[in-house]
Image (cartoon, coloured by chain):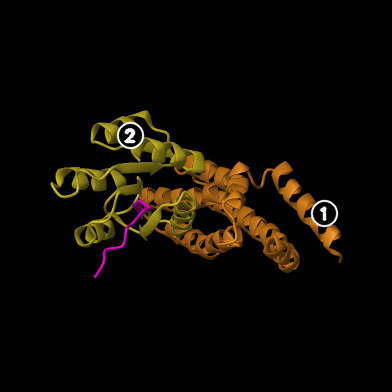
Chain colours: A yellow, B orange
Amino acid sequence: MSTAMVSEPHVLAVDDSLVDRAVISRLLRSSKYRVTTVDSGKRALEVLSLDRSVHMIITDYCMPEMNGYELLKRVKESAELRGIPVVIMSSENSPARIRRCLEEGAEEFLIKPVRSSDLSRLCSRLY
Amino acid sequence: MDYSTLRRQITFMKKSFFDQGYLDEQFNQLEELQDESSPNFVEEVVALFLKDSPRLLTNIEHTIGKYPQDFHRLDSLVHQLKGSGSSIGAVRMKNECSVFKAHCNDKNLEGSLQRMKREHATLKQKLESYFQLLRQVAPREHAVNLRK
């Protein structure tokens, strides 16, 4: 059985908002990413434990039960996952929040609504 | 109504939404994401918003009615509504949510809620009219795209 070459980076998008998942998914697909969306940090960790093809995680900050910062911490604390870049999205432009996430190892902190130009800039840095 | 008249009406309607402050640039950003693989993306996302937001408004209303008031939950619900409104470019809806959040500790939450509900109803009516018109020009525009 031959292995197919995967040319599109695979992004895991995490957001508890149905609307925002649809928007970020479309944004990522139009920027030629392969996208998997989940609605919680818990689900994100489940996917990550089963699928080793994720190249980047983009997560909302404000989510119930496990917020984006907590997900970021869990990823960076894991030997298997810590190499995956994590991007945080938030509608709140809070310097303290931004600093905390970047210090914890977030690749980027994007203010919602996220634009195509934000993803283009990210893509050129990461790939 | 002929195609060019419909197109003019659509353009005028959309411009009025922007001029009256119902929509902002984010709506244009969503339209730019539409292509042949996703030709109805904006209508689909707006439909998601219009389907999900009544649930949030109902939950906000129930939470206001509870004693003692759960301001944390109230703030979270309004934050969700504000966020999804912002994501579709519904700037007046977003602003009403901001006003509500700012007055979360006031006694007249019911008044703020009614304003949010009115804003939501107006937005729904306007966007549904807009997409109804767009659907009328869609078959012709799809045929034009196929010939390219």
Judge the density around disc 2: few (<14), some (14-19), many (≥20) Cα neighbours within 10 Å.
some
Note whether residue B136 is visible: yes
- Left or right: residue A54 compared with residue B54: left
Where is residue A96? Give x, y as percent: 32, 30
Rate crowding at label 1 as few (under 14), some (14 to 19) or many (20 or more) other CA atoms within 10 Å.
few
Q: Amino acid at mark 2?
A: Arg
Query: Callout 2: helix, strand or loop?
Result: helix
Front: mark 2 or 1 = 1
Badge 1 element: helix
Residue at 63% over, 53% down = B119
Q: Which residue is mark 1?
A: B8
Relative vertical location of residue B32 with respect to residue B65 in this rendering, above or below: above
- Highlighted range, magenta: A1-11
Q: Nearer the viewer, residue A37 or B108?
A: A37
Image: B102 above or below B13: above
Decide if residue A26 is on the left or right side of residue A66: right
Q: Quadrant of residue B132?
A: bottom right
Q: Is residue B92 visible?
A: no
